[in-house]
Image: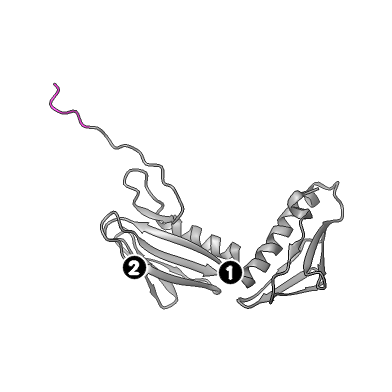
């Protein structure tokens, strides 16, 4: 039995949960999300108690065990997303690197001979706090906001993949809370022959 799967999901105030067959629709102040549940997992919505219960009908089945906690976490993320939302802060390090928002796309200048563009998915907002780096100490900063945690995380990972941080000077795109392990460069011999 999954420990995560057994925990009930508390429905936040202002959030409405509808279940039709295998489809669960969650709507709240920030928007609405929907997802199809796996047939082996049973979801019960208790409006009066303000809880959602996720049950595994066949606990001896291996796939049922695996999906129990996963489905509960996905539904909890939907409830959290439509009530509070999710955000991912990102930073760009490197002299002359910058980011701009143009026509529904993010345009990055990160040391290549050409700008790199990424289309902003529907349901994600971008706030650019600092658009260009200032030396190697002050990074360009931007924040991704959205209700769908999976979509937000995937978009952030796609952006980071454009230019991952390198270990010598730390140049590149990274998450704000990410620690980059640094390597020491080559040491040159001084005057010894």
Local SS, label 1 = loop
> Which sits in the foreground, 21 or 75?
75
Mark number for residue 85?
1
Query: How would you rate the neighbour count of disc 1 (Cα within 10 Å): few for under 14, some for 14-19, many for 20 or more?
Result: some
Residue at 71% across, 68% down:
35
Mark 2 element type: loop
Q: Are marks 1 and 2 in contact (CB under 8 Å)?
A: no
Residue 103 in the image, given as x and y percentages of width and height: 41, 78
Q: Is residue 69 magenta?
A: no
Q: For this view, does 26 lie left or right of residue 39?
A: left
Q: Residue furthest top?
A: 193
Left or right position of 83 against 106:
right
Provide the residue span drawn in magenta.
188-193
Q: Position of residue 38 (x, y in %)?
A: 78, 61
The number of discs equals 2
Dot 2 corresponds to which residue?
A: 131
Residue 55 percent across, percent down from the top left: 83, 58
Q: Position of residue 27 (x, y in %)?
A: 68, 76
Residue depicted at 52% across the width and 65% down the height: 87
The residue sitting at 29% across, 54% down in the picture is 137
């Amino acid at each position: 039995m999954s420990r995560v799967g057994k925990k009930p999901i508390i429905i936040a105030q202002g959030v409405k949960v509808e279940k039709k067959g295998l489809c669960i629709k969650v709507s709240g102040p920030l928007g609405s999300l929907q997802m199809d549940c796996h047939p082996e997992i049973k979801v019960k919505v208790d409006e009066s108690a303000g809880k959602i219960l996720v049950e595994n009908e066949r606990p001896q089945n291996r796939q049922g065990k695996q999906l129990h906690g996963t489905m509960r976490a996905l539904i909890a993320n939907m409830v959290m997303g439509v009530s509070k939302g999710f955000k991912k802060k990102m930073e760009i390090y490197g002299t002359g690197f910058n980011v701009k928002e143009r026509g529904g796309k993010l345009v990055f200048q990160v040391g290549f001979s050409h700008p790199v563009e990424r289309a902003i998915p529907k349901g994600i907002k971008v706030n650019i706090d600092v658009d260009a780096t200032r030396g190697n100490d002050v990074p360009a900063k931007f924040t991704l906001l959205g209700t769908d945690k999976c979509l937000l995380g995937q978009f952030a990972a796609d952006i980071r993949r454009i230019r991952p941080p390198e270990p010598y000077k730390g140049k590149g795109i990274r998450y704000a809370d990410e620690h980059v392990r640094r390597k020491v460069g080559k040491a040159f011999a001084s005057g010894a022959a």
